[in-house]
Image (cartoon, helix red, strand yellow):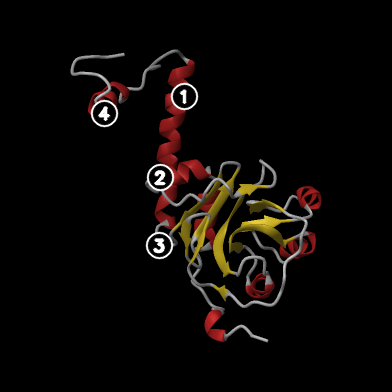
Amino acid sequence: MNHPSDADIRRDIERTPPDVVARNAVFASSILADVCGRRGTMHGRIAPLLPGMRLAGPAFTVEVRPGDNLMVHAAMVLARPGDVLVIDGKADLGCALMGSIMINACKAMGLAGVVLDAAIRDTDELRELGFPVYSIGANPNGPTKGVSGRINWPISCGGVAVRPGDLIVGDADGIVVVERERAAALPALAQRKVDDEQARIADILAGRELRPRWRDAALRNAGAIGDGETL
């Protein structure tokens, strides 16, 4: 039998600090994505089990072979309270990698949530539990536990790169990944974006500025209307 090599399991990582996590956690994933240059969002196939679920924390990354969750069990032992398990399950829907037993354990361990590019099971139980779980779907079939993988290496999850310790924020819209080095600078940018959007919505509700100022210029640049034309 093959056994995981210590070279494949990195126990110590540099995490996004808790205070930085907390300051970013108050913002919507869409706001953070916008101030990150509209990048870092996972594919929409990765969705919360319930719309009201939110999570925020440093990524504790796991790479597994499709259908095998051995390294997920190992990662659960090594992760710290507040971590988000981010699992590259190769977008496999052939079986579930986690179910109620493992997710109950994650909640009891104080983890911040689980993000799976793979399937889960025991969906009704997990929804009642309320612990933040994002996945690509469900399958009643269980996984194998015989193939090694890697822990705390860079992975691809939902089509984006995730490094150990990167900031993960999720809400009803999905998951955004922020590089650990950039996370501390984002709250100020995010608050400015929120203030601008709230002012714009207030103008709309008051019947002012119903036409975006940038629209005609963008249409001209795209060749949709000519110089001097307007809608």
- Give coordinates of residue 52: x percent, y percent: 67, 42
Front disc: 2 or 4: 4
Give the residue at x 71% y 60%: 95
- Give coordinates of residue 222: x percent, y percent: 26, 28
> How many angstroms separate mark 1 from mark 4 (CA)?
26 Å
Residue 38 got which mark? Answer: 2
- First in residue order: circle 1 vs circle 2: 2
- Circle 4 crowding by C-alpha within 10 Å: few under 14, some 14–19, many from 20: few
- First in residue order: circle 3 vs circle 2: 2
| Left or right: residue 195 compared with residue 53 | left
> How many angstroms separate mark 1 from mark 3 (CA)?
32 Å
Front disc: 3 or 2: 2
Identified by mark 1, the residue type is: Ile
Q: Is residue 117 above or below residue 73?
A: above
Residue under label 1, please give it: 201
Q: Regarding mark 1 in the picture, which secondary structure is present there?
A: helix
- Circle 2 crowding by C-alpha within 10 Å: few under 14, some 14–19, many from 20: few
- Give coordinates of residue 40: x percent, y percent: 45, 52
Residue under label 4, please give it: 222
Identified by mark 4, the residue type is: Ala
Identified by mark 2, the residue type is: Arg
Give the residue at x 40% y 62%: 181
Which one is in front, 90 or 77? 90
Residue 181 got which mark? Answer: 3
Give the residue at x 44% y 48%: 187
